[in-house]
């Protein structure tokens, strides 16, 4: 039984090491995801800028089309004025021309604002793309380094899994199953050290007879309080 307890202790050590390695790997994967998200966020901003710029360009074209049409109307109206015979008609057309010129002026003002917005956004977009290129290059290097760390962690996990398989081969399947269930129920710790009459897993006092029986190594004994498998550890002098 003592040999089996030693093997169970090694099994717990292996499982805890695997837990640590898997947690480290998960952290590295999260970091890698964060790196990718940073690049994706900038690319999302670029896409938004490009959408806005396309919309501004479209609005600019519409204004230019309207502006050209109004100028043609003014020219046409001014040409027609030469053929008008009555003063009333002349004044009416004059008012139309004045209103059209006011509209042309407003359109030209809007065009200037639109062009200014386009120039400003184009500059911001160029700067954002430059930043994205630098970030993407830096991120690619970081991802390569992070992947190397992940691969190394996975190699260590694989090695520990093989070690675990070698340990479990020497133990009864029923004992491994009991160990696994206890480990799941007790937050990764199926075994607990028994020292000076106490279970160090739950810090509860053990019945004297049970504690004395631990010295015999005749059977597998568990803590009556936390149900962990007990391993006797004498106080070192």
Image (cartoon, rainbow, N blue to C red):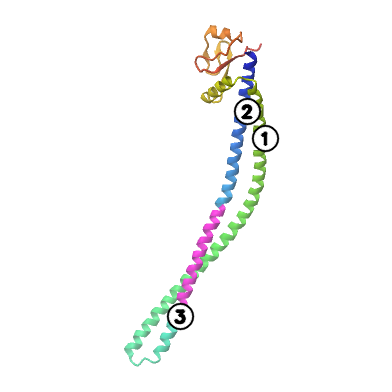
Looking at the image, which residue is at 42% across and 86% down?
A: 78
Name the element at disc 2. helix
Looking at the image, which residue is at 49% across and 65% down?
A: 56
Percent position of residue 176, x then y: 58, 22
Please name which of the two marks, 3 or 1, marks the residue nearer to the observer: 1
Name the element at disc 1. helix
* Res. 192 mark: none
In the picture as drawn, the residue positioned furthest to the left comes out as 88
Label 3 CA crowd tier, 10 Å (few <14, some 14–19, many 20+): some
Which region of the structure is painted magenta?
A: 42-69
Label 2 CA crowd tier, 10 Å (few <14, some 14–19, many 20+): some
Looking at the image, which residue is at 46% across and 70% down?
A: 110
Q: Which residue is mark 1?
A: 155
Label 1 CA crowd tier, 10 Å (few <14, some 14–19, many 20+): few
Magenta stretch holds residue 34: no
Q: Which residue is mark 3?
A: 71
Left or right of residue 112: residue 237: right
* Res. 17 mark: 2
> Looking at the figure, which quarter contains the C terminus?
top right
Q: Earlier in the sequence, mark 3 or mark 1?
A: 3
Percent position of residue 68, x then y: 47, 78
């Amino acid at each position: 039984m003592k040999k089996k307890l030693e093997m169970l202790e090694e099994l717990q050590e292996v499982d805890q090491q695997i837990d640590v390695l898997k947690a480290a790997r998960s952290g590295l994967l999260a970091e890698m995801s964060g790196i990718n998200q940073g690049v994706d966020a900038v690319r999302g901003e670029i896409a938004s800028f490009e959408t806005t710029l396309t919309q501004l360009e479209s609005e600019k074209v519409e204004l230019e089309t309207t502006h050209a049409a109004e100028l043609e109307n003014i020219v046409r109206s001014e040409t027609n004025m030469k053929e008008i015979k009555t003063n009333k008609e002349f004044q009416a057309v004059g008012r139309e021309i004045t209103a059209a010129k006011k509209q042309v002026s407003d359109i030209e003002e809007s065009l200037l604002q639109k062009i200014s917005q386009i120039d400003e956004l184009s500059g911001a977009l160029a700067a954002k793309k430059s930043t994205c290129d630098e970030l993407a290059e830096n991120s690619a290097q970081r991802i390569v380094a992070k992947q190397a760390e992940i691969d190394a962690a996975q190699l260590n996990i694989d090695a520990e899994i093989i070690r675990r398989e070698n340990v479990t081969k020497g133990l009864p399947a029923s004992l491994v199953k009991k160990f696994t269930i206890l480990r799941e129920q007790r937050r990764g710790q199926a075994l607990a050290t028994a020292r000076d009459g106490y279970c160090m897993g739950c810090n509860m006092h053990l019945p004297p007879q049970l504690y004395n029986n631990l010295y015999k190594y005749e059977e597998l004994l568990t803590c009556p309080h936390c149900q962990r498998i007990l391993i006797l550890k004498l106080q070192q002098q």
